[in-house]
């Protein structure tokens, strides 16, 4: 019998397995992939704080600015903190560290059934060798946006946006974001440099047409896709817990979820170490580390859904607050930027504020 069965060896699963193995727990990890991290669906754009955790050796690009364009104007945000990491190597590195701490990893192995018992869980996993039963005290769903653990627990799924990306063989030194809800009603389209290539992509309705329209004369090296969860879910039930994308913990405004995948595993492993009322403890730890920001970000997303199309109102606000935004801008904490803009709004733009309020009232 294991102490913990972890479903999924992505960044969330490998990090939590490492943390728990280090604390002396017997951990079994399973992943349906043949090779950890392959295929990869992620652009790998992170803040420097993620690199401080996972290591400088994974960095493949350092974009110097992000150009944001909207139908009514464009602006450029500078950043010394943006990094692009090699996502396949990141997953492999974290899984290797977890194994070196003692976690036992089975690849090409998937969870097929999960049952709660008095003092733990009973799972059925399927591999080339057939079906096998695994008993453990706890199970952790680190199995991504379409989580089977979440489904087995009857926890409501977040909204899932399907995304499409093409890698092109050219270089760039900046991130480009196009916000145009007429073309991408659910999200935005992006271009992210990654060493010798750039990745272009879009999420939600219309992604395919938008991404094909961005290719121009460049050569498409590869095509890939993935799901972005929008909005956090319950964090678990009984002896079963969800972390990372399985719990919808990526940022609802940008889709970035690597930092949350790692931090949620940190919060859960501390709770498991304490041992009493683990779910309650996990919720508390998560809320006081990064969970409050994820919830705020989801609220911002709902605001943007309502107001994003009023580019004529907010583009001037952002443009004139640029020097301040460049100082406090942080991809992991978008609420800081929004609060900065809101504070400067009434002082500097009384007329804009009135327009915003009257437009809001009429929508
Ligand atoms: C298009 C796109 C671009 C993105 N770009 C960025 C970005 O630039 N920066 C950023 O921070 N985030 C980005 N993200 C988000 C980021 O990829 C996720 O937040 C991150 O991968 C979450 O890690 P995770 O470990 O929770 O889940 P995942 O990385 O999805 O890992 C889940 C693992 O579980 C395994 N699994 C699933 N089901 C089962 C099962 N039943 N049994 C066994 N194993 C199973 C899978 O094979 C997988 O290995 C992007 C996402 C998408 C879709």
Image (spheres, helix red, strand yellow):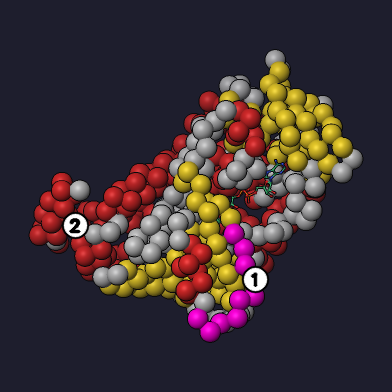
Residue at (70, 56) in percent of width and height? 37
Whether the residues at callouts 2 and 1 have beta carbons within 8 Å, the answer is no
> Which residue in the protein does label 2 denote?
345
**Is 125 located above or below residue 200 in the figure?**
above
**Is 257 located above or below residue 295 in the figure?**
below
Q: In the rendering, at what x and y percent does residue 14 appear?
A: 69, 47
Work out how far the residue at label 2 is from the one at label 1, CA to CA, in angstroms.
43 Å
Q: Residues within 10 Å of mark 1 (few under 14, many from 20)?
A: few
Q: In the rendering, at what x and y percent does residue 224 appear?
A: 62, 63
Foreground mark, 2 or 1, reads: 1
Residue at (19, 57) in percent of width and height? 345
Q: SS for tag 2?
A: helix
Visible in this render: residue 80?
no
- In the picture provided, is 206 more to the left or to the right than 270? left
Circle on res. 281: none
Nearest the viewer among 155 and 335 is 155
Quadrant location of the N terminus in the rendered image: top right
Circle on res. 222: 1
Q: In the rendering, at what x and y percent does residue 338 appear?
A: 31, 54
**Is 58 located above or below residue 117 in the figure?**
below
- In the picture provided, is 308 more to the left or to the right than 240? left
Q: Which residues are magenta?
A: 216-225
Query: Does the segment drawn in magenta span residue 151?
Result: no
């Amino acid at each position: 019998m294991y102490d913990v069965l972890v479903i999924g060896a992505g960044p969330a699963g490998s990090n939590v397995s490492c943390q728990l193995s280090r604390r002396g727990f017997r951990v079994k990890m399973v992943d349906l992939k043949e090779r950890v991290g392959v295929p990869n669906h992620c652009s790998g754009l992170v803040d420097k704080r993620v690199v401080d955790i996972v290591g400088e050796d994974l960095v493949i690009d350092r974009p110097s600015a992000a150009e944001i364009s909207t139908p009514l104007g464009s602006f450029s945000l500078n950043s010394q903190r943006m990094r692009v990491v090699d996502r396949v190597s990141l997953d492999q590195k974290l899984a290797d560290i977890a194994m070196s701490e003692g976690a036992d990893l089975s690849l090409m192995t998937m969870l097929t059934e999960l049952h709660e018992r008095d003092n733990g869980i009973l799972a059925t996993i399927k591999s080339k060798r057939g079906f096998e039963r695994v008993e453990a005290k706890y199970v952790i769903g680190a199995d991504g946006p379409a989580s089977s653990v979440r489904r087995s627990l009857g926890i409501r799924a977040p909204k899932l946006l399907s995304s499409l990306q093409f890698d092109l063989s050219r270089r760039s030194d900046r991130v480009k974001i196009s916000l145009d809800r007429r073309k991408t009603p659910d999200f935005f389209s992006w271009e992210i440099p990654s060493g010798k290539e750039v990745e272009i992509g879009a999420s939600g309705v219309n992604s395919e047409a938008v991404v094909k329209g961005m290719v121009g004369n460049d050569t498409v090296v590869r095509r890939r896709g993935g799901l972005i969860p929008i909005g956090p879910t319950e964090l678990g039930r009984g002896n079963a817990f969800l972390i990372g994308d399985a719990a919808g913990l990526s940022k609802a405004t940008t889709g970035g979820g690597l930092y949350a995948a790692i931090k949620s595993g940190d919060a859960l492993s501390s709770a498991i170490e304490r041992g009493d009322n683990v779910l309650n403890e996990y919720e508390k730890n998560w809320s006081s580390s990064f969970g409050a920001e994820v919830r705020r970000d989801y609220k911002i997303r709902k605001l943007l859904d309502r107001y994003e199309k009023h580019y004529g109102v907010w583009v001037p606000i952002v443009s004139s607050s640029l020097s301040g935004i460049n100082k406090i801008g942080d991809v992991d904490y978008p609420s800081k930027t929004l609060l900065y803009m809101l504070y400067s709004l009434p002082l500097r733009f009384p007329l804009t504020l009135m327009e915003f309020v009257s437009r809001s009232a009429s929508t």
